[in-house]
Amino acid sequence: MLEWAERAQARGDRATAIRVYRSMLLDEDQDARHEARFRLARLLALDGKLSEAAILLRQVIDDRPDAASARFAMAQLLVRIGDETAARRELRALQATQLPLESARLVDRFSDSLRIHKPFGASIELAVAPDSNINRATRSDTIGTVIGPFEISEDGQAVSGTGLAIRGQLHGRFAIGETANLSGRLSASADLYASGAFNDVAVEATVGPELRLGRNLVRLEGGAGRRWFGGRPFLDSARIAASVTRPLGRRAQIRATGSVAVIDHRLNDLQDGRAFGGSVAIERALSPTTGLGVSLAGDRQALRDPAYSTFSWRASVIGWREVGRTTLTATVDYGRLEADDRLLLFPSRRRESFARASLGATFRQFTFRGFAPLVRYSIERNRSSIEVYDYARRRAEFGITRAF
């Protein structure tokens, strides 16, 4: 059957070759099935059916994590789709296999020259999200002040509910030279509830150049965004940012970012000002099926009122593992925040510690039209010296995401 399809392809009869490979996808011989999937994916990619081809390659990789040819083809396909981050992750996983020296050098050359040419791309994630604290509010019914305890109204306390969580992005790239692109991105997120008073929606648009300097990928961007809460404009911002991504050997990469933003708080002028942020993140493939990432980020809010001005930092660890056709992820975050001064109403400055743990799974064995179901569960705890900022939260998400 494989020879028949190969001969058909050699004489230019691609349609017959595709029919033969499709007929082999249920073959009793696993090796034959994998070879048919791999060859069919390459033909579909030639016809521009990139998502279907990517799903077939992912099925091969799920069953054979050390299938170097399939993983390399997957990285090439992700480049065509426009997802550079996923392409580089596949290359790092590929380097974690026992590649022959010449093959390893070929992967190195491809990684160094990797450049996204696809003009436009998009991604989306949808989920139904039961949440114990949709407004991240305290469960206390009183708050301590310098003149005694005040009662907190019910709409200022924690509210539980089930909403629709939407995360999406549109991006475009245009070549402006041999080693440079002009990149633009429109990002949006929304948590929508039956009670519109707690809807949280954010949109940001950015644009800037991407430069290849040796093995470094440098991105510069400027952008503006708005956040709405309860259907009302809540926060406007404009920022400039820069990032540098560099390989660390064949299995790891480091990414450093920095940004400066101007903030216009639409409900409280005392919270207008500037924000400065920076982060360093390292990601490493431990094996073809396992990876680990660590990051450290800091943020400075220099606002009109010192009582609202804060310094914060957060450390994160993320791990993932492929188990058959299921991807498991785990994330742990811990951070601290401290205000410059106290609000006159409260006896002390705002001091907080934040902790969050999350577990998630994507089930590609149930793929439908390029999407796979996902489940995610997270726990948050923010301990604050000011009761109104002290909260606990549990959240589950049941949704769909891209299957490859």
Image (cartoon, helix red, strand yellow):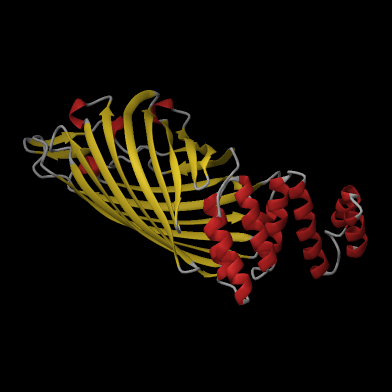
Counting the numbered discs, the total is 0
Residue 73 picture quarter? bottom right
Q: Quadrant of residue 87?
A: bottom right
Residue reaching furthest to the top: 232
For this view, does 246 lie left or right of residue 158? right
Name of the residue lying farthest toward the left: 147
Give the residue at the far front of this rendering: 178
Q: In the image, 72: left or right of 345?
A: right
Which quarter of the rendering shows the N terminus?
bottom right
Camera-nearest residue between 102 and 323: 102
Where is residue 160 drawn, in percent x and y? 41, 39
Residue 171 placement (x, y as % from top left) = 53, 38
Judging depth in this view, the residue of 223 and 101 nearest the camera is: 101
**Position in image of residue 61 (x %, y %):** 67, 63
Residue 166 vertical position relative to residue 116 in the rendered view, above or below? above
Give the vertical position of 11 relative to 400 (above or below).
below
> Who's the residue at 30% across and 54% down the image?
314
Residue 278 in sight in this render: yes
Query: Which residue is painted at 32% across and 29% down in the image?
Result: 235
Is residue 288 visible in the rendered structure shown here? no
The correct choice, above or below, for 16 with respect to 174 in the image is: below
Residue at the image point whose x is 50% and y is 68% from the top: 250
What x and y, as percent, mark residue 350?
16, 45
Q: Is residue 39 left or right of residue 119?
A: right
